[in-house]
Image: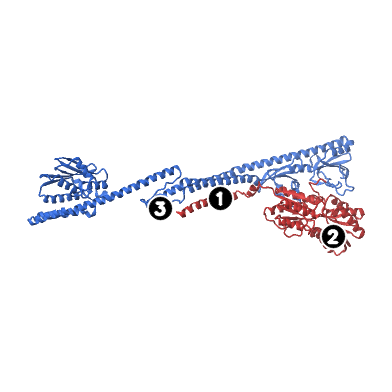
Chain colours: A red, B blue
Amino acid sequence: MRNKKIRFPRLTVLWIIMFLVIGIAAVRFFGLNDTGAFFNAGEERQYIAVIGKSDLSAFWISVSSGARAAAAEYNLDMTFEAPSSEEDFEAQNEMIRNAIANHASAIVFSAIDYNGNAEAINEAINARIPVIIIDSDVNCNLVSCRIMTDNYLAGRMAGEQAARNNDGNLVVGIVNYDVNSANGQQREQGFCDAISESGRVSQIYTVNCVSTEESAYEGTTALLTEHPEINTIAALNEFMSLGSGYAVRDLGVSDSVDIYAFDSNVVSVGMLETGEIEGLVVQNPYAMGYLGVEAAYNVVNGHPLHSDHIDTTTTYVSVSNMYEPNIQRMIFRFDDPS
Amino acid sequence: MKTRRLRIADVSLSDAMTMVVVTIVFVAVMLALIIFNAFFRDSIIDNAITNAGQSVDQVAVTINNYTDDMIEVMDRLYVNSIENPDSQEELFEDLIEIRSDIVMIATYDAHDNNTGIWSNSDTKEMIFTNLSLYSVPADAVDGINISAPHVVSVLDNEYPWVVTITKSAEETFSNAAKIAIDVQFSRIADYIDEVGIGQHGYCFIMDADGNIIYHPQQQLIYAGLKTENSEILNLPDGSHISDGVIYTIKTLDNSNWKIIGVTFLDETVNSRVNTMIIVSVLIFLLVVLMSFLSGRLFSRLFTKPVKKLSSAMRAFEDNAAGFVYEPVLGAIEVNSLSDSFEHLVKRIQQLMEEVKNEETTLRKTELKALQAQINPHFLYNTLDSISWMCEEGKNEEAVTMVNSLAKLFRISISRGQEIIPIDKEVQHAECYLQIQKYRYTNQFDYELDIQESCKDYLCNKITLQPIIENALYHGLNMIDEGHIIIRIFEDGDDVIMEVEDNGVGMTQEQIDNLFVSDITDKRGIGVKNVNDRIKIYFGERYGITIKSELDVGTVVSIRIPKITEDMRLEK
């Protein structure tokens, strides 16, 4: 008797389990695959904090609109923050700590200072907040994903063009920004390596400026005044491009000096036509912002990432290709009226 | 337990109920889902197609209106330039001022040399490239061409995205062969952005060559993060379903642009199916839970009490006498079942007790009857008579006497059986009568009147003899011409055995006394013994009745049922 008493419910349970299994199979058959979304519908929206290096440059405006597009697509709350000065890594660290305090689901971050931001990023990772690095790397090997231009290759791209466009003796001036920024250093390295391979480089002078137009202007002016033999300048970010462009224009040496600049805005594009700037290495900031938030979404929701390192594309723009339809689309932003 | 037959299913009632309910609900839910999928999917698809078609039509109408409006403006400018060439520049300036969506107006001569630019923004000091300069194909309607979107390249530090509407005229008007208006594209773009079809559906514009004119996510497309299905270029206007996506295509009337609506079918249909499936699964789980609970309730009210009852019955079967019944509680039906069973148990136990008592009584009375047969007094007297006969040389009579005695004892014993054929019983009585007749030297005579048909029926052994003994000792003792008649005959379903004597008779009091007193007055086992045995054996309605009249005689009649040897064996 005792045996049987145990057997009866087990039979019923088996019966019910059988139906549940058939039910689940049927559910699969009907193509139900986002039940999770149904059950998650009532949950709070995930919050992604995007912390950039600047909120003034066209580059970072484009990053933030890419991030916004991804946030809209994946139904996330997203904030974009950046310090007013592109040197102020302390302000960035403060923003990271705020994001931790606000229980961000993930942080998408671009480091002003390779080492200076490392501690705050580690704090975030210790608080179990995944970190996605975009554009500029930080000294931390625990971040979930890095999405950036291969800055060394971008530097090489500019260097190769410089060597190709001038078959004479090359005297190079580098106008770089913060010496602590990994990006700038890698670009400089790439540029110098590529141009040196031509074997026609007689001298390389480097000036490091603060990442503002004025500082770059002063730096370039000083460089060119001190070394008037310079005929090739590498300006390694958007503000460096503008500053050195204006400096060359004002010194009246735009014919003798070729500037190879990074990133684009309407002014630097104009300088392509007027001849101060020879070529622009244009990154894909919109993709960085978009992919950064997308990767954050995937990490937070446990979806596997294709890779922990994504290289975004770079394009070389010169006066000869700047109005090609695909280049137009890249350098003239649609949602940007100016 | 070992002999239990194989059951169809070893399932309790409540489990069976749960299973049945779960099965029915499951089948119903599955059927509902299948029907929903089969019948409503089509209608949802139709709905989605209709919605997409409406949205796309609306976009087409809006864009058509807008371009028509622009073409109308262009026609005005053209007419004015012919009729009133002097006011042309003024009109251009006014138009730029009033219409914020017109970025630039430019005129060109027959050799595409720029003859004038009107804009609210400054033009570049030096114009390297002019993207707003288009030639108008010869077959263009009204000589009007609408360009693909592009940036304006002639403004200082401004690169707005525009569409250039160009009109060329055969006859030159003023100093221009061509007027080009750059219209801000963001007006159209904003409108397209606003259009949503379904949850994530959208509209985009493509030209006849497959170039995307505008896409709400064109930044993603330009950044290389998204591509559109390239096959749609070759599809005609109308709705097309491909891989769960509905593409609704409409070509604009006044340009080669196509409006393409993209609706994600799976999303639309599946979200409904999903909701339904989830609701169904929840209902199903709820039903499972409910049927579990009701099964438990049912079990508490019915199954468990019934199980308890059945185990009680089994226990009762195993040990009927010592069983103590504890009533089970459950549903009303179960309670009444329990009450009935309790009653049954009590009744059976009572009957068992009775049977046991009767058995005891029977054995006792039987023993007494046998003991009476071997009464030493009777034996002594009989043997004495035989000895006298031998002495007197009545050998023949002595032999008869001995035979009778032997037969008497043999039948008395009858191999321990209580029931013997009437024939045997009659022989027994006859032996006894013969012996007594010798002893009492023919002081009485007797007569047997036996129906032949009754001889095979059964009766208790030692039934007639005690009655005859009574008749001899109490009835006939005082008179000389004693006469005893023994009759056996059928009476319906019964057999009556009568012993009649013509003796002194008895008073009613004496008769009554015979049935009460266990001990006979003098010898023999008495009427009560016989009566008791018949009643125990055959039932209350059988037994002895005595009719007696003083100085006339007594009739003792014994009623027994007709029972044959075969009937007894069957029992």
Q: Name the residue beneath numbered marker 2.
A: A164
Q: Are marks 3 and 2 on the same chain?
A: no
- C-beta proximity under 8 Å, tags 1 and 2: no
Amino acid at dot 3: Arg
In this orientation, does residue A14 appear?
A: yes
Q: Does residue B293 appear left or right of residue A156 in this picture? A: left
Amino acid at dot 1: Leu
Q: Name the residue beneath numbered marker 3.
A: B5
The 10 Å Cα crowd at callout 1, few under 14, some 14 to 19, many 20 or more, is some
Q: Nearer the viewer, residue A192 or B483?
A: B483
- C-beta proximity under 8 Å, tags 3 and 2: no
Furthest toward the top, the residue is B83
Secondary structure at badge 3 equals: loop
Mark 1 or 2: the one toward you: 1
Q: Which numbered disc flags the more N-terminal residue, 1 or 2? A: 1
Amino acid at dot 2: Arg
Q: CA distance from mark 3 to mark 2?
A: 100 Å
Corner quadrant of residue B385:
bottom left
